[in-house]
């Protein structure tokens, strides 16, 4: 007896993570995309880079580069076979940097491929460049030269930058994890930097919250208790032009699809309802407090928050507010304040407070596996993702789906941010 046609298996859904590439003033110019082909246990640690990259390119065409890279450049690793197959021609040239790995041999076929890509206005980076690199023949095609500054002496780094930096080629320092490393690399002649140094502020002299941030934290406090203080919320929004504007734009956005006009701030609050109002305030305060900081920090805060919220129904977390845990997890870097100062006065549940403080000093709590899963997924540390997902009995496919949805959601929320920041 026929059961009818069987549905086709779902195509591989590559695991994408990204690492920011910044200027010396911490402006994000692009993201290196890190990937794995599959979330299944047998393939999770696969080293088939060609297959993973081709599936990633297909996924980027579906999700959109703007959603994954927030409108910045996408730096995508490229093996020799991927280069020769011209798969990158499926991606827009103005949004892609093709990273040629150190394993690529600069033979005549590779040089011809680089020539074709340059003629079509694609940008090329030489990854993990070293002194006496065998890819010297590809230098004329390079827009970026990436150097792992930890592998060489300061003298070697300086010599590389002096020899190859120019109007057509930027020197990019990789594996920059501290500001001291960034300043040293800048002194050596590098103009772009890759790493998470900007997320771990080393000099936090301020022992108070800046006045311009006080209202935002008060607003966050007003919706973080057991009962929302609507009167306090209304007054705080009324006296903050940026928040007022954000509220009106949000109500007019396709995210909500409301049709009736807004008559007042109180009316706007009632249209949203308590649950959606709390969600909006958490997003808006993050955007306001992050106005003077790197855009990636704000986007990361929202991605973390939404990711934690999406997996909350699948994991044991007691009464902890996982959305708030994710959002506040990077607020110390956004505000340039110690986490203890950030959470002071906020009516957080004990588990969330303990994890936010404990994570900064390496003290584990009941929420630590969730917190570490969040960080590992963001950084593309696939082995650690598998370990912590297993600890909380969360399928890897669920982790991937939640993170992809969180990235898309955060991109939608922050899409109007450049205009809003002018207020």
Image (spheres, rainbow, N blue to C red):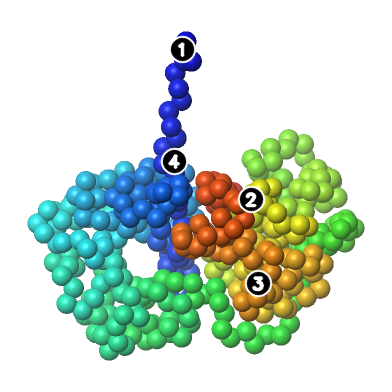
Marks 3/1 in contact by CB < 8 Å: the verdict is: no
Question: Would you name the residue on which mark 1 appears?
Answer: 2
Density class for disc 3 (Cα within 10 Å; few <14, some 14-19, many ≥20) is some
Helix, strand, or loop for circle 1? Answer: loop
Question: Would you name the residue on which mark 2 appears?
Answer: 311
Question: Would you name the residue on which mark 4 appears?
Answer: 62
Measured Cα–Cα span from mark 2 to mark 1: 38 Å
Report the front residue among 49 and 66.
49
Indicate the quadrant where residue 133 lies. bottom left
Residue 421 visible: no
Report the front residue among 282 and 401.
401
> Which badge, 1 or 4, comes first in the chain's sequence?
1
Helix, strand, or loop for circle 4? Answer: helix
Density class for disc 1 (Cα within 10 Å; few <14, some 14-19, many ≥20) is few
Residue 370 relative to residue 214: left or right: left
Report the front residue among 82 and 247.
82
Q: Position of residue 210 (x, y in %)?
A: 71, 78
Helix, strand, or loop for circle 2? Answer: helix
> Which badge, 2 or 1, comes first in the chain's sequence?
1
């Amino acid at each position: 007896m026929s059961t009818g046609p069987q549905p086709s298996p779902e195509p591989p859904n590559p695991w994408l993570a990204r690492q920011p590439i910044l200027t010396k003033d911490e402006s994000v110019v692009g993201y290196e995309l890190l990937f794995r082909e599959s979330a299944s246990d047998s393939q999770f640690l696969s080293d088939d880079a060609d297959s993973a990259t081709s599936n990633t390119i297909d996924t980027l065409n579906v999700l959109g580069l703007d959603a994954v890279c927030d409108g910045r450049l996408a730096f995508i690793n490229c093996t020799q076979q991927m280069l020769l197959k011209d798969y990158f021609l499926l991606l827009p040239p103005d949004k892609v940097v093709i990273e040629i790995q150190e394993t690529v041999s600069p033979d005549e076929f590779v040089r011809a491929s680089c020539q074709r890509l340059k003629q079509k206005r694609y940008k090329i980076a030489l990854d993990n460049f070293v002194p006496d690199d065998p890819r010297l023949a590809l230098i004329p095609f390079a827009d970026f030269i990436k150097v792992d500054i930890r592998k060489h002496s300061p003298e070697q780094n300086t010599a590389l930058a002096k020899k190859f930096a120019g109007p057509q080629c930027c020197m990019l320092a990789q594996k920059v994890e501290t500001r001291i490393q960034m300043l040293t690399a800048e002194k050596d002649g590098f103009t772009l930097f890759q790493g998470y140094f900007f997320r771990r502020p080393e000099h936090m002299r301020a022992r108070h919250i800046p006045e311009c941030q006080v209202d935002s934290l008060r607003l966050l406090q007003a919706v973080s208790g057991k009962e929302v203080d609507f009167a306090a919320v209304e007054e705080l929004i009324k006296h903050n032009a940026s928040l007022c504007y954000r509220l009106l734009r949000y109500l007019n956005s396709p995210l909500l699809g409301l049709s009736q006009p807004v008559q007042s701030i109180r009316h706007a609050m009632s249209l949203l309802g308590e649950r959606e109002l709390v969600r909006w305030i958490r997003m808006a305060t993050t955007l306001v407090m992050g106005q003077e900081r790197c855009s990636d920090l704000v986007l990361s805060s929202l991605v973390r928050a939404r990711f934690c919220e999406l997996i909350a129904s699948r994991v044991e977390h007691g009464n902890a507010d996982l959305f708030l845990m994710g959002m506040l997890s990077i607020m110390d870097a956004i505000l340039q304040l110690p986490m203890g100062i950030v959470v002071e006065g906020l009516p957080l549940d004990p588990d969330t407070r303990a994890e936010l403080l404990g994570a900064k000093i390496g003290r584990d709590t009941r929420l630590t596996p969730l917190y570490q899963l969040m960080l590992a997924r963001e950084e593309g540390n696939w082995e650690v993702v598998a370990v912590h997902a297993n600890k909380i009995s969360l399928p890897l496919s669920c982790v991937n789906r939640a993170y992809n949805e969180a990235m898309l959601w955060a991109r939608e929320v922050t899409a109007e941010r450049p205009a809003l920041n002018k207020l």
